Image (cartoon, rainbow, N blue to C red):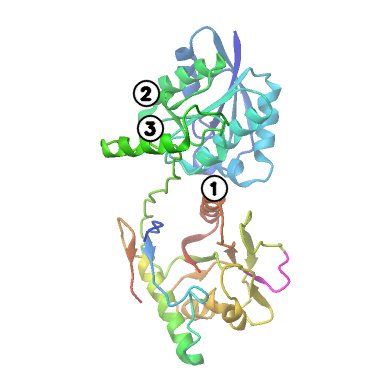
């Protein structure tokens, strides 16, 4: 009998919705919520011995959260770790993906389930993830697929697209008995034959973003300002990178009406920053925002702005920044955001 | 449009998204205000796909 530890967010363990999204990780004995059905589906050879659950904001936004989750997971001595299904939920998907990556790195077989469009998917690295439906309405079909994948992973099998695998597959170097020229011609012939998908180098997919609902009355709401223009206090206290950023930062705008040259600068390495440094409000329009705030055209300008450098940033990091910004802003009083892009 | 941002206000140059160094001080500030006003109109508008709000 193999011991399985199942990861679910605060919603699926019944702790609560957004009100409980800040919950620190907890461990519960046995299967919980959808884990009960999953336990039935994976049969008597496997047992869900514990369920670890964490709030979405905590899991996606707190440094070291996944280490804490992993500590609880490992305390239950798992042979295998299962996470999700996370459907298209961004923070939840991010947590599931990071957890299976961490478990795999620690030598514990793991598998997660989420929709291929889940923005957290890439965080799994090469750890196995299988497809789920887009929403929890598809739980009934997503769980059997996950159960099948669990059985395969437990047997030590490598999951493939035929198992519903999604996301990055670890690159394995192998020698082909056909030359590159041969294979290129063969692929061309396949294309000509109508196969639009045959490839040896799958391209990254870009997300389709569902637009947020509009704000009812912008005169009543707090508006956040966000930029990928690398604008920081002159000393760059957070060491924001000029390219390939791995982080984003927040700086206070409280009591500030204008951004003066010499006090702020752009560290962006992808364009000449001469104009931005001569007038930092060419990157972050604080004077206009304050004017509109005083006139009552907007409720308030959020007390901090968010910044990163959008220059050669990996899609994975950019996606993570987006998820973290959304979670952070969701917690702030802001109900709209203006992002200036260079 | 290609990256799929739902609401887009086009501006005049990569190095100065909320400015235009070719304008004199007051004219540049007025342009910046126009851009922010347009962005506020955009967040108050229902969209179903990437949509451009010309300033």
Q: Which residue does the image show at 59% across and 63% down from the upper left?
A: A307
Q: Residues within 10 Å of mark 3 (few under 14, many from 20)?
A: many
Residue named by callout 3: A133
Is disc 2 in the same subunit as disc 3?
yes
Q: Quadrant of the C terminus of chain B?
A: bottom left
Task: Pick whichever of labels 2 and 1 is earlier in the sequence.
Answer: 2
x and y, in percent, of residue A119 in the image: 48, 44
* Mark closer to the observer (2, 1): 1
Q: Nearer the viewer, mark 3 or mark 1?
A: 1
Q: Earlier in the sequence, mark 2 or mark 3?
A: 3
Residue A315 visible in the picture: yes
Above or below, comparing residue A104 to residue A59 in the picture = above
Q: Nearer the viewer, residue A206 or A24?
A: A206
Disc 1 designates what residue?
A316
Q: Secondary structure at mark 1?
A: helix
Is residue A55 placed above or below B36 in the rendered structure?
above
Q: Secondary structure at mark 3?
A: loop
Of all chains, the one bearing label 3 is A
| Residue A324 is inside the magenta segment | no
Q: Which residue is mark 2?
A: A140
Measure the alpha-carbon separation of dots 3 and 1.
Answer: 22 Å
């Amino acid at each position: 009998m193999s011991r399985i530890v199942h990861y679910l967010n605060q919603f699926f363990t019944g702790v609560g919705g957004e009100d409980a999204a800040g919950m620190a990780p907890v461990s519960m004995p046995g299967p919980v919520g959808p884990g009960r059905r999953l336990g039935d589906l994976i049969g008597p050879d496997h047992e869900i011995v514990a369920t670890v659950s964490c709030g979405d904001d905590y899991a996606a936004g707190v440094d070291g959260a996944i280490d804490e989750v992993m500590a609880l997971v490992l305390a239950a001595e798992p042979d295998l770790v299962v996470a999700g299904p996370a459907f298209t939920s961004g923070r939840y998907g991010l947590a599931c993906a990071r957890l299976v990556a961490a478990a795999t790195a620690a030598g514990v077989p793991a598998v997660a389930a989420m929709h291929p469009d889940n923005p957290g998917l890439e965080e799994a690295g090469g750890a196995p993830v299988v497809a789920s439906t887009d929403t929890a309405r598809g739980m009934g079909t997503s769980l059997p697929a996950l159960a099948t994948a669990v059985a395969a992973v437990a047997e030590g099998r490598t999951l493939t697209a035929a198992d519903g695998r999604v996301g990055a597959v670890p690159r394995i170097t192998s020698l082909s008995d056909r030359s590159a020229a041969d294979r290129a011609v063969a692929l061309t012939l396949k294309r000509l034959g109508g196969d639009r998908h045959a490839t040896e180098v799958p391209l990254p997919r870009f997300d389709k973003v569902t637009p947020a609902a509009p704000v009812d009355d912008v005169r009543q709401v707090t508006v956040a300002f966000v930029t990928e223009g690398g604008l920081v206090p002159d000393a760059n206290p957070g060491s924001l990178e000029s390219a390939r950023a791995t982080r984003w930062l927040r700086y206070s705008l409280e009591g500030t009406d204008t951004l003066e040259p010499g006090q702020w600068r752009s560290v962006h390495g992808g364009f000449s920053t001469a104009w931005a440094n001569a007038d930092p409000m060419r990157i972050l329009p604080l004077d206009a925002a304050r004017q509109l705030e005083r006139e009552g055209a907007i409720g308030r300008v959020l007390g901090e702005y968010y910044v990163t450098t959008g220059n050669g940033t990996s899609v994975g990091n950019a996606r993570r920044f987006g998820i973290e910004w959304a979670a952070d802003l969701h917690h702030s009083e802001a109900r709209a955001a203006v992002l200036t892009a260079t | 449009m290609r990256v799929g941002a739902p609401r887009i206000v086009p501006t005049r140059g990569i190095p100065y998204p909320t400015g235009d160094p070719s304008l004199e001080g007051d004219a540049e500030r007025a342009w910046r205000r126009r851009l922010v006003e347009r962005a506020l109109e955009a967040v108050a508008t229902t969209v179903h796909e990437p949509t451009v709000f010309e300033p």
